[in-house]
Image (cartoon, helix red, strand yellow):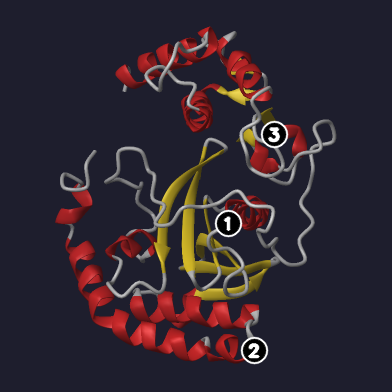
Amino acid sequence: MSEENAGYLTLASYHRCAERIQTKWPAFLAKREDRLRQQARHGTAMEKTAEGIVDDLFAEVLDWQPGDLDHQVEHADIVLTQNFIKYLVIEVKRPGALAWHRQALDKALAQARVYADEQRVSRIAATDGVMLYAADIENGVHHDRLFVRLDRPDAPLALWWVSVHGIYRAREGTDNRSLTEEPLAVSEGALAPDGFAELLHPKYKLPARCFAYVGNAADPHTWKLPHLDASGAVDERRLPKAIQAVLSNFRGVKVGGIPEPAIPDVLTKLEQAAQRLGRMPGQGGAAAPVYLQLAEALSQIRRAG
């Protein structure tokens, strides 16, 4: 679905929120710059600075009340809560710790995922006061929800997706849900989140973010189909094996411990990894049989709706 045809654009709640975002954005930028003066003076700023920026964003730019932002809930930095319902777990890192490094962001999201699974929350976010990324957890797979710069001069109306009336809606308006505003480098120099030791799979010695399916981030026995290495790069040896492990029992009720409703999301995630390597049909050269099979399976799934 294209952005122009997205149904949310007709909602009165969207238009009210969009107007508020545009009105409040200049004041938010000024306050954010003031909060970051410490960073300008000393070359760094504390995590508390980024938390203050998050508070300003959700309670002043968006339509949440200050009391809706619960801090330090069962180890989670911030949990958006309204009427006793938890909507979003936010992992906050010091300014500049995440932008623009894929490995650092993935680690922060893994941390948020652990807390979200423990609290039965299906949406997570990570921010360092420079950028904000949010994702939905559907069938054990992350789906992009939002990725915006928090220092951009124009108001990002996509913030509606984490507003009071946007947070509970399924994300729409993009064809491939690729929402990155800046290139995310897989870099050895990426700054790891502070004080978080990632849980590793006992067999593969990899964190949850390297698997195509994660049933519960706190239980490695529910992690299936490793296809990335520890840096976040695609593992060229493991990827075709992961694809074949699904396709060999494609019509089964469960495939290697993965619930059948999760299969489309898992295959799509593996397709995205194959595209990063340029291995899918149409990306140049003759595609290997496993990638042809993957394309055919996804074509069947997408035709079926």
Which amino acid type is shown beneath numbered disc 2?
His
Between marks 2 and 3 in the image, the one whose residue lies nearer the viewer: 2
**What distance separates the C-alpha of mark 2 from that of mark 1?**
22 Å
**294 lies above or below 60:** above
Residue lying farthest front?
285
Secondary structure under tag 3 reads strand
- In percent of width and height, residue 185 lies at 55, 51
**What distance separates the C-alpha of mark 3 from that of mark 1?**
24 Å
- Confirm or deny contact between disc 2 and disc 1 (CB under 8 A): no
Residue placed under numbered mark 1 in the picture: 101
Residue lying farthest right?
202
Secondary structure under tag 1 reads loop
Q: Give the class, few, some or many, for how many residues have Cα within 10 Å of label 2's Cα (few <14, many ≥20).
A: few
Secondary structure under tag 2 reads helix
Which amino acid type is shown beneath numbered disc 3?
Trp
**Point 51% across, 66% down: residue:** 84
**Point 42% across, 89% down: residue:** 31
> Closer to the N terminus: mark 3 or mark 1?
1
> Closer to the N terminus: mark 2 or mark 1?
2
- In percent of width and height, residue 140 lies at 57, 37
- Total numbered badges shown on the rendered structure: 3
Between marks 3 and 1 in the image, the one whose residue lies nearer the viewer: 1
**85 lies above or below 28:** above
- In percent of width and height, residue 65 lies at 41, 79
Asked where in the image residue 91 lies, by quadrant, the reply is bottom right
> Closer to the N terminus: mark 2 or mark 3?
2
Residue 223 is labelled as: 3
Q: Does residue 287 appear left or right of residue 111 in this picture?
A: left
Residue placed under numbered mark 2 in the picture: 42
Q: Does residue 24 appear left or right of residue 270 in this picture?
A: left
- In percent of width and height, residue 71 lies at 61, 75
